[in-house]
Amino acid sequence: MEILSKVENGNFVLSFVGRIDSSNANEAEQLINEQRAGHEDKNIIIDAEKLEYISSAGLRIILRLRKSQPGLRIINTSSEVYDIFEMTGFTEMIKVEKAYRVLSVEGCEVIGQGSNGVVYRIDPDTIIKVYRNPDALPEIRKERELARKALVIGIPTAIPYDVVRVGDGYGSVFELLNAKSFAKLMLDQPQNMDEYIDMYVKLLKDIHNTEENDDVMPSMKNVAVQWAEFDRDYLPEPYGDKLVQLVKAVPESRHVLHGDYHVKNVMMQDGEALLIDMDTLCTGNPIFELGSIYNAYEGFAIVDHTCVERFLGIPFELADKIWKKTLELYVDTDDLEKVHEVEEKAKLIGLMRLLRRTIKREPDNKDFIETCKNQICHLLDNIDDLSL
């Protein structure tokens, strides 16, 4: 056992080396107190990079330190030591950070992206989702929990098996042996387009036919109501009020939604379609999902069609075909008027979301904002119910 210390960036950093257990805990605590003398006012960081093992006697030392410095945190823990902290409940009381592997995505193929991150292929067997938020560990834990829940209730998905550092941020690593996105399959094998869209829509329906009653997944309706209430202030008064009323009137539902369903988030592995990018998993009426799908293929491109190619890697003409075929198969009717009715509802949900997003993120994009507002008002003239 060895205890090293230094002052760094105004913090008192303690490095634990070796093993701390009942045989040397008293000696360790004495060394800590001696080295900390004169630095009692500084925040404590415990660097556990070289800590091989810690027993309950060592954990009690940390608890006593935390009593004097509530902001104490532990960094660079190995997986084995982290398991000890997690099993004993320390991760719920103290911020404990793992020592993560470092990976680079330089030169790697981008196979998908969304608002929360970008998905890269590292090699034929491995993909990595790199999160945009540099402090994404809570998001990663949430996505892992949602992915596990989805798998338990029968939705095929990839489960992340490792968390790594990528630059200044974090990434989740998935094993997908020789898997290809549906976007790539449709580009490379246009002769099999109908077969792939059939599989794509079948998986979508399987997801929507699954119910989740444990409140692990958030309600999409609650989020959509917030979008509508935001947009109300930017729409002519009768239209804004009607939009909020329509969204609030959508029936509650515990049916599962992916939340970001498009051809780059559906992979083919060994003849099976499975999902990636599970942080948007939620529950609600399927119209909310169709609104998101509309955005992926057409909504983002209402002013500039090249947006689709930048986002999905496929030309707008193909995206338009996928959207229309998806809608026809999903609604499952020869009644073109019914298909059009569902499409108009999906557009309204999608454009409502895009209007809020653009006003908040790109307020200078006036053409896009005005186009969204005009189309939303036109749709509201003809829609009196949003549910499917």
Image (tube, rainbow, N blue to C red):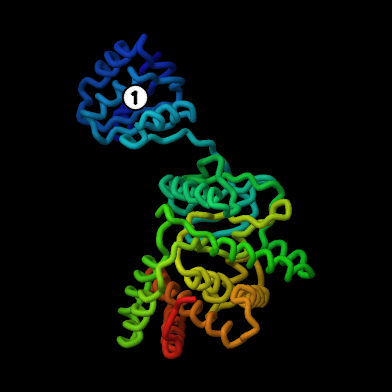
Q: Is residue 280 above or below residue 232?
A: above
Position of residue 210 relative to residue 289, above or below, is: above
Q: In this view, does 94 lie above or below 275?
A: above
Instruction: Residue at 56% x, 41% y: name it.
Output: 161
Q: Is residue 134 visible?
A: no
Q: In this view, does 168 lie above or below 195?
A: above
Helix, strand or loop at mark 1: strand
Density class for disc 1 (Cα within 10 Å; few <14, some 14-19, many ≥20) is many
The reply, left or right, for residue 10 in relation to residue 294 is left
**Residue 28 pos. (x, y %):** 32, 14
Name the foreground residue: 164 vs 242. 242
| Residue 265 appears in the figure | yes
Q: Left or right: 168 with respect to 174?
A: left
How far across and down, in percent of the image, does residue 159 sit? Answer: 56, 46
Query: What residue is drawn where x is 30% and y is 25%?
Result: 62
Total numbered labels? 1
Amino acid type indicated by mark 1? Leu
Residue for badge 1: 14
